[in-house]
Amino acid sequence: MAVIGVSLERDRHPANVIFNKINLRYPVDVFPVNPRGGDLFGQKVYSGIEAIPHSIDLAIIAVRAEYTLDTLRACIDAGAGGATIISGGFAEVGRLDLQQHLAQLARKHRFPFIGPNCLGIYVPGCIDTFFIPSERMIRPEVGKVALVSQSGGVLVDQMTKFAELGIGLSLGVSIGNKALVRELDLLRYLAQDPKTGVIAFYIEGFASGEGREFVTAARECAKPVIVLKAGKTREGMRAVSSHTASMAGDYAVFSAVMAQYGIVEAANELELVSFCEVLSCYQESIDGRVGIISSSGGHGALAVDICGRRGLSIPVIDLQQQAEIRADLTPSVRSIASLNNPIDLTGSATDSDFLEAAEHLSRIPELDCIIMLLLPYSPEITSDIGARLSRLCKRYNKPLVAYVPHVDRYRMLIEGFEFNGVPVSPSIKGAVLMVEALRRCQPC
């Protein structure tokens, strides 16, 4: 890699941050470039990309906008594989002509670039072109979700949430003004990427006719596609235009088309995170008939209300099935448990009670998903319950979604679910949203 535009005076210049981070933390040979040459952090600074005695796979361009065209031409002449243009000062501030010249030059030479006005590319353990210091980045682990965002800030914020909730990332791309490489290009690439199982987008707007191509490609994609759309209101459309110079278009039409084509639309960031997590665990859609198990009647009632508002059904468990469940519960719980969906096992429940209830619900064909509301405060629940419940539901091929308060002392319990491919939410609403995503991710 070459980082073009490093400063010899400002150690915290964005280009310097990128160079230093890659040089110290990633398995990549990286070379700093500044026309004046010199020395940076003990490394030779090259006067131009053509002076580097190695072929360059990716050039990071972080020069002033007026220098980007010549810099891009130099990268092409040097035989670089592609570029990420971090620099701002293009269409978002009215300089559409300069942005168009960049794209025209790149198309002429079949030279791909991300940006401008972006953070670029993040792949866990491989590469990070973000100009955010390492100590300020919270990084998700390797996983199945690819996240493409016009906004670098939204991407970093979602990556932080992913890391906090244990959601793994295959690739994060901030495309900024997307002068050349756009959502459609990345959708087609990620549809074939063996490391990606779920593709999520934060989209501000499309060029004329581009939205139709995008939803058509998403429909043909075998992987779940999730979209969080900005610019839903008149004021939002104005904000989008000033941010990345995008045309927001008619949101109501786009939203209706996404639903028709089987694309999962997230209404907000909470839905985006929940949808990404659950769809990275389960690929098959459901009808939305939910069984709920809890040790708290209040939590079960709250979950039922949220399910109802989301169009999910809570089928009644008939008396015969209730009797069979009750017979298998421990004596201390058998007489006090409420078993008419939601199942309230009470605070006296043991691991065995949860496992018996889950096994019975897994065998009921009228239920196609289970929400497990686990309160680790119960004295007879162990840290193994997450793993044991996960493996039980896998045997029956019944999707399981868990709610567990995300507190460090419950980490072992949560990991028992996560290590076995069961999504866990820190909120009841988040758990219900995961089930909704499975219902909405329907084949066309």
Image (cartoon, helix red, strand yellow):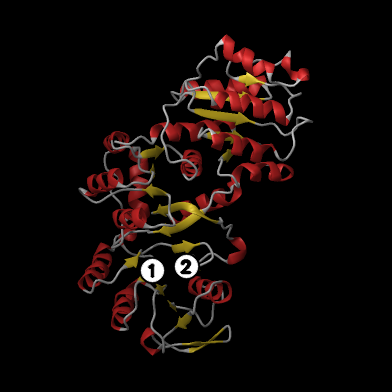
Packing grade of label 2 (10 A; few <14, some 14-19, many >=20) is: many
Q: Residue at x 39, y 49 (%)?
A: 201
Instruction: Decide if residue 426 is in sight here.
Output: no
Q: Quadrant of residue 120?
A: bottom left
Q: Residue at x 52, y 62 (%)?
A: 124
Seen as rendered, the residue at the extreme top is: 319
Name the mark on residue 294.
none
Q: How many marks?
A: 2
Residue 363, percent across and down? 54, 25
Q: Residue at x 55, y 48 (%)?
A: 161
Residue 354, percent across and down? 67, 28
Query: Which residue was labeled with disc 2?
Result: 129
In this rendering, position of residue 262 left or right of residue 417: left
Q: Residue at x 70, y 21 (%)?
A: 329
SS of the residue under disc 1 = strand
**Residue type (three-letter) at the residue carrying disc 2:** Thr
Instruction: Decide if residue 310 is in sight here.
Output: yes
In this rendering, position of residue 385 left or right of residue 176: right
In this rendering, position of residue 11 left or right of residue 412: left
Query: Which residue was labeled with disc 1?
Result: 84
